[in-house]
Image: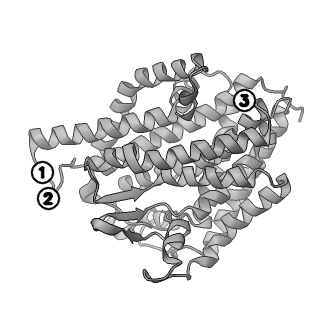
């Protein structure tokens, strides 16, 4: 098979933005679910007997979001260093932006979820995890690339060996372990509680792997060779997922046969996100690599453009959609009251999908406007953090 010509930088980066945009839309769907379908909240992993297939599929699609986004964050960090003065500039940028994201999670993001000031609970979620992962990567970029990749793979593959390790609340290691690997509550003075929703250790492994993939996308890299690597990497991860899942062990709740094929498949793909198991990351990153290859091979297809728009201004979209959803929920409660126990909510998952589509359409123009401003005004330093 002959190699394709080397991709132009615009094509090369366009596929990254498009993949980021796709998972952002999956995230939007999941956040609409968490806003208007909270009366049918799901566990982690999900309870098969109590979860409708439509709800299971909607939630499982959203599993792609965090792993793909963190992987692309690492990849983008390598590309940032290629455009600037190497690892020194990259490390400084990663540290500053990581710190910015942590502060953003503690302030604007948490307020968007709770509308409570001062807060009684702070949820340390995906933006927090990405921020801490970027701070960790600001140190890891100084490692040789083979060592960086090996460390990332070791963390992703081996962190489930630590699942049995726990520390009591009075232990000095309780707080750092809750931040790194065990989803937990942290009690602070004056009744403030922190929820470590996204233990960060596995995400450090993912961002390191993303950074290690950077040379595949560097200037002068061959598109055909890159696409072959993406295909091989994606297929190996998916094969690894299937083999390990069939063994029914290591870091994951066991699956089982049910009376119908649908529930059996749901059980097989019912994986743990908090913290993300090896199987969770093998499945989602495998699909992510294959999607990235597909987007690059699609070239300038018209349907990719809108996805790339969302992916070009991810943090702006993230903040915007959270506040829009919260305001919509408050308005619905004011107009219709609480119709699902202590929640206002839709009767079916179809309405969740409909609202997600309508919101994606409504938010497209403001996101495109901000993305264009960000590209045009590179002299405004703070814009690059969004």
* Residue at 86% across, 29% down: 220
Q: Are marks 1 and 2 in contact (CB under 8 Å)?
A: yes
Q: How many marks?
A: 3
* Residue 51 placement: quadrant: bottom left
Where residue 239 sits: x, y (%)?
A: 70, 61
Disc 2 on helix, strand or loop?
loop
* Towards the viewer: 65 or 144: 144
Disc 3 on helix, strand or loop?
helix
Q: Are marks 3 and 1 in contact (CB under 8 Å)?
A: no
Answer with left or right where residue 219 lies relative to residue 313: right
Q: Residues within 10 Å of mark 3 (few under 14, many from 20)?
A: many
Q: Could you tell which of marks 3 and 1 lies nearer the N-terminus? A: 3
Q: Could you tell which of marks 2 and 3 lies nearer the N-terminus? A: 3
Answer with left or right where residue 45 lies relative to residue 121: right
Answer with left or right where residue 320 lies relative to residue 18: left
The residue under label 2 is 341
Where residue 355 sits: x, y (%)?
A: 31, 36
Disc 1 on helix, strand or loop?
loop
Q: Residues within 10 Å of mark 1 (few under 14, many from 20)?
A: few
The residue under label 1 is 338
* Residue at 22% across, 47% down: 346
The residue under label 3 is 12
> In the image, is residue 131 above or below residue 79?
below
Answer with left or right where residue 255 lies relative to residue 184: right
- Quarter placement of the N terminus: top right
Q: Residues within 10 Å of mark 2 (few under 14, many from 20)?
A: few
Q: Is residue 346 visible?
A: yes
* Residue at 27% across, 41% down: 326
* CA separation in Å, label 1 and label 2: 6 Å
Where residue 190 sits: x, y (%)?
A: 28, 66
Q: Are marks 2 and 3 in contact (CB under 8 Å)?
A: no
* CA separation in Å, label 2 and label 3: 49 Å
């Amino acid at each position: 098979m002959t190699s394709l010509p080397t991709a132009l930088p615009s094509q090369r980066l366009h596929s990254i933005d498009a993949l980021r945009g796709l998972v952002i839309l999956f995230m939007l769907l999941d956040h609409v679910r968490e806003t208007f379908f909270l009366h049918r909240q799901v566990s982690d992993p999900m309870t098969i007997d109590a979860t409708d297939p439509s709800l299971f599929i909607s939630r499982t699609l959203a599993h792609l979001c965090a792993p793909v986004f963190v992987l692309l964050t690492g990849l983008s960090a390598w590309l940032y260093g290629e455009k600037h003065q190497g690892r020194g500039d990259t490390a400084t940028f990663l540290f500053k932006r990581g710190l910015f994201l942590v502060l953003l999670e503690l302030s604007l993001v948490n307020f968007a979820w709770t509308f409570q000031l001062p807060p009684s609970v702070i949820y340390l979620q995906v933006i927090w995890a990405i921020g801490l992962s970027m701070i960790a990567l600001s140190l890891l970029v100084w490692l040789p690339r083979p060592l960086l990749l090996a460390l990332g793979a070791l963390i992703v593959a081996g962190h489930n060996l630590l699942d049995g390790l726990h520390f009591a609340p009075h232990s000095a290691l309780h707080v750092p372990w809750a931040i790194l690997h065990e989803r937990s509550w942290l009690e602070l003075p004056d009744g403030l509680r922190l929820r470590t929703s996204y233990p960060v250790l596995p995400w450090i492994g993912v961002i390191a792997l993303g950074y290690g993939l950077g040379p595949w996308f560097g200037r002068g890299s061959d598109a055909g060779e890159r696409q072959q690597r993406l295909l091989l990497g994606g297929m190996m991860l998916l094969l690894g997922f299937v083999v390990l899942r069939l063994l029914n062990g290591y870091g994951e709740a066991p699956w089982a046969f049910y009376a119908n094929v649908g529930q059996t498949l749901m059980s097989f793909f019912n994986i743990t996100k908090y913290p993300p198991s090896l199987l969770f990351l093998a499945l989602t990153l495998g699909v992510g690599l294959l999607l990235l290859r597909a987007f690059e091979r699609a070239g300038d297809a018209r349907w990719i453009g809108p996805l790339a728009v969302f992916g070009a201004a991810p943090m702006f979209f993230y903040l915007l959609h959270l506040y829009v959803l919260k305001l919509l929920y408050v308005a619905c409660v004011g107009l219709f009251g609480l119709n699902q126990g202590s929640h206002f909510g839709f009767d079916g998952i179809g309405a969740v999908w409909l609202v997600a589509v309508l919101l994606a359409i409504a938010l497209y123009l403001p996101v495109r406007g901000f993305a264009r401003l960000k590209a045009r005004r590179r002299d405004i330093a703070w814009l690059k953090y969004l």
